[in-house]
Image: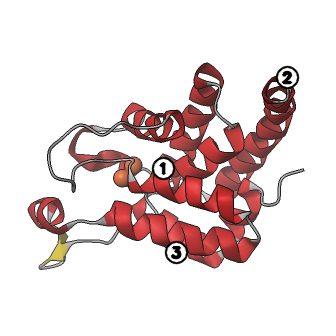
């Protein structure tokens, strides 16, 4: 069994507040993409899905005169930094192992390079997965952030993914232990 399930993360008020702000539908879609990619990359699906689900938890809404200001966002945004810290705090509170919480936080920190100086980053597979899964769900003009999903549907998609992770973890651990 895992220390912390996606469902317990989903139910937390911090997740409800901040993941919803960046788009719950997007977060769930990215978690599913990351789950599929984790098999391809042979990465722990528990870490990949948690990092993916929480990757945009650091979003701040950049408004000017009551409207989202994309220019302002591009210029000032640090959502990956804020998100890494916020997700780490949440995971530790929920009882996640500190080693896992750190790996997840790092993958969130590096899921985008838009705020970093130019240059090549040598990403680890877990970090690549989250960045790729995010791109897979991207829509022009940032529309993926505005797609909505009702709470019941979100909850059932999350629970279903939890089941898939538990099944996949058996196999992942088998391979890792040999
Ligand atoms: Fe992001
Ligand atoms: Fe995203």
Q: How is the image coloured?
A: secondary structure
Label 1 or label 2, whichever lies nearer to me, is 2
**For residue 56, side relative to residue 9 (left or right):** left
The quadrant of the image that shows the C terminus is top right
Q: Is residue 70 visible?
A: yes
Label 3 or label 1, whichever lies nearer to me, is 1
Above/below status of 44 relative to 20 = above
Q: Label 3 to label 2, Cα distance in Å?
A: 41 Å
Above/below status of 178 relative to 94 = above
Image coordinates of residue 151 in percent, x first then y, are 64, 60
**Of callouts 3 and 1, the N-terminal one:** 3
Disc 2 residue lies near ligand 2 with CB under 8 A: no
Q: Residue furthest front?
A: 178
**Of callouts 3 and 2, the N-terminal one:** 3
Proximity of marks 3 and 1: CB atoms separated by less than 8 Å: no
Dot 2 corresponds to which residue?
A: 178
Image coordinates of residue 101 in percent, x first then y, are 63, 61
**Of callouts 1 and 2, the N-terminal one:** 1
- Quarter of the image where one finds residue 165: top right
Residue at image point 53% right, 47% down:
52
* SS state under label 1: helix
Dot 1 corresponds to which residue?
A: 107
Proximity of marks 1 and 2: CB atoms separated by less than 8 Å: no
Q: Which mark is residue 81?
A: none
* SS state under label 2: loop
Q: Which mark is residue 17?
A: 3
Above/below status of 123 relative to 65 = above
Q: Label 3 to label 1, Cα distance in Å?
A: 21 Å
């Amino acid at each position: 069994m895992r220390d912390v399930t996606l469902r317990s993360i989903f139910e937390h008020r911090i997740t409800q507040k901040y993941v919803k702000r960046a788009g719950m539908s997007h977060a769930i879609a990215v978690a599913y993409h990351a789950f599929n990619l984790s098999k391809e990359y042979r990465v722990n699906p528990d870490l990949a899905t948690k990092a993916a689900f929480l990757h945009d938890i650091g979003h701040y809404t950049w408004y000017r005169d009551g409207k989202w200001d994309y220019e302002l966002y591009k210029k000032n945004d640090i959502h990956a930094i804020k998100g890494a810290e916020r997700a780490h705090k949440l995971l530790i509170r929920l009882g996640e192992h500190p080693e896992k919480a750190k790996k997840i936080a790092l993958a969130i920190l590096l899921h985008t390079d838009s705020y970093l100086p130019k240059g090549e980053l040598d990403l680890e597979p877990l970090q690549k997965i989250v960045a790729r899964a995010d791109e897979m769900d991207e829509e022009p003009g940032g529309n993926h952030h505005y797609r909505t999903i009702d709470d019941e549907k979100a909850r059932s998609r999350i629970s279903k993914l939890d089941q898939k992770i538990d099944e996949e973890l058996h196999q992942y651990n088998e391979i890792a232990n040999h």
